[in-house]
Image (spheres, coloured by chain):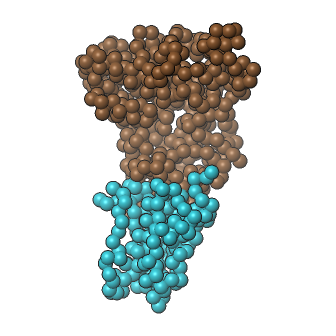
Amino acid sequence: MALYSDKVMDHFQNPRNVGKIDDAQNVGIGEVGNAKCGDIMKMYLLVEDGVIADCKFNTFGCGSAIATSSMATELIMGKPLEEALELSNKAVVEALDGLPTHKIHCSVLAEEAVKAAVKNYYDKNGIEYDAEKFAQVHDCEHCAD
Amino acid sequence: MFVYADNAATTCVSKAAVDAMMPYLTNNYGNPSSLYSFGQDAKEALEEARKTIADIIGAQPREILFTSGGSEADNQAIVSMAKVGAIKGKKHLISTKFEHHAVLHTLNALEKQGFEVTLLDVHEDGVVRLDELEAAIREDTALVTIMFANNEIGTVQPVKEIGALCRSKGIPFHTDAVQVAGHMPIDVNEMNIDLLSMSGHKFHAPKGVGVLYAKRGMPLFNIIEGGAQERGKRAGTENIPGIVAMAAALKESVDNMEANAEKMIAMRDKLFAELSKIPHSKINGSLEHHVPGTVNMCFEGIEGESLLLLLDAKGVCASSGSACTSGSLDPSHVLLSIGLPHEVAHGSLRLSIGEYNNMDEIDHIIKVVPEVVSYLRSISPVWEDLENGKRPHLI
């Protein structure tokens, strides 16, 4: 019995969409997490006509942190921004065929990374939004600092 | 290539141990408490194993108590001394910040029962200071328990001097020698040790068997009640196959100790030398006072669990003190106790070498660790910040 599902291991060992996108007006960049807690995710979204035309990530963290970031990029690629905002940590966990209980935190971080990147794009382009949608779920004492 | 480099976690069972235990797993299954000769044969094997182990550490056979392992031995030693102390009105216990949880959690439980616990600093080098121990000792100190060598960073403590200090103050001294037994010389008399724990599976015996040495006159209280075994101090039918195997494994390890240590130190030092070439890496704990087989290092900008998983994919079994591998939010208490910042401690790697490893395996580790570290750094936003100056390098 392995620690993680085959899908988690696949996304961890062969992460999709790893990399960066140069900052520009139509690029949203979001970073969440805390090095003190052992995980930081940085998400890059290239937006064209309100749709995520490209998406990249960099992650410092455990196997499931890398796998959840990778899966999150796959789930939002090509989607309208509004749809990406609906991405839940639960959807990421399901797409990965589950995570150990103490790793659910990583999927929350992936959801927040996408939201932070969308928010950055909105802010940059003066687009109004409902702040409620960006309320972060702090589930870690260091991150709450 | 498969490389087992986690010998501080557990070791393979040696052929000597298997050969020794086999008769007791097959034909000689008698209960040593039975009167008939079939049972008494098992009793004889039990007492012979006790004598073998006693001789190796300079103890009397009656001072050797067989347990289920190091954790049970630690529990029984500490709880017993606390109870004896409490009878005399002494309710202060001294230990260190980087003990094994078998010690720390037992102390924690005693704290809740009204005992006071002082945990000594182990400084950046992972070595306790005698003057600080002396300053911590009080009139009501019932026990000093300090590990012989640390399980994560491999630093060896000045046990003999600690023992002498404790003896001069009339305080019982217990040491968790789980990482030392079979690998470095132990002499309980010369080292002034009153109580000592060891665990068979750290020196090529099977899991589930260990020893508590208790100097004659050290009163022990039972953790397990229910029978007259082990002079009434530990109930339960003795694990004869495990005990016999443990004695054989310890004897073999001790008989070859010098040669094994020489081989392990050569491999360990090569790992330190080569892996230190990775930029922004750090060796954890003093190299001057060190067990032969343990290498503990940190690599900045990466996280330990992903490092371990990628090493596993390349055939290397290792361990880490990162929070993610411990299942908690905080990295290892050992790495924090030597002053490492959280973000650095998350990137730790422990490789523990045994005499069954060889230089080809070490070369494989030296090849794959830098590859994996450099890959993880390439996808790490922390490393990016460190490299472009947005975040200061800490190591």
Q: Quadrant of residue B105?
A: top left
Q: Residue at x 47, y 21 (%)?
A: B225
> Farthest residue in the bottom direction?
A49
**Residue in the foreground of this view, choosing between A109 and A89:** A89
Colour representing chain A:
cyan
Where is A50 relative to B71, above or below?
A: below
The x and y percentages for residue A45 are 47, 79
Where is B66 relative to B58, above or below?
A: below
> Farthest residue in the right direction?
B27
In this rendering, position of residue B157 left or right of residue B17: left
Chain shaded brown: B
Q: Residue at x 57, y 26 (%)?
A: B209
Q: Residue at x 68, y 17 (%)?
A: B30
The x and y percentages for residue A28 are 42, 79
Where is B167 relative to A95, above or below?
A: above
In this rendering, position of residue B125 left or right of residue A53: left
Residue B264: tell me if it is visible: no
Q: Quadrant of residue B203?
A: top right
The x and y percentages for residue B177 are 49, 25
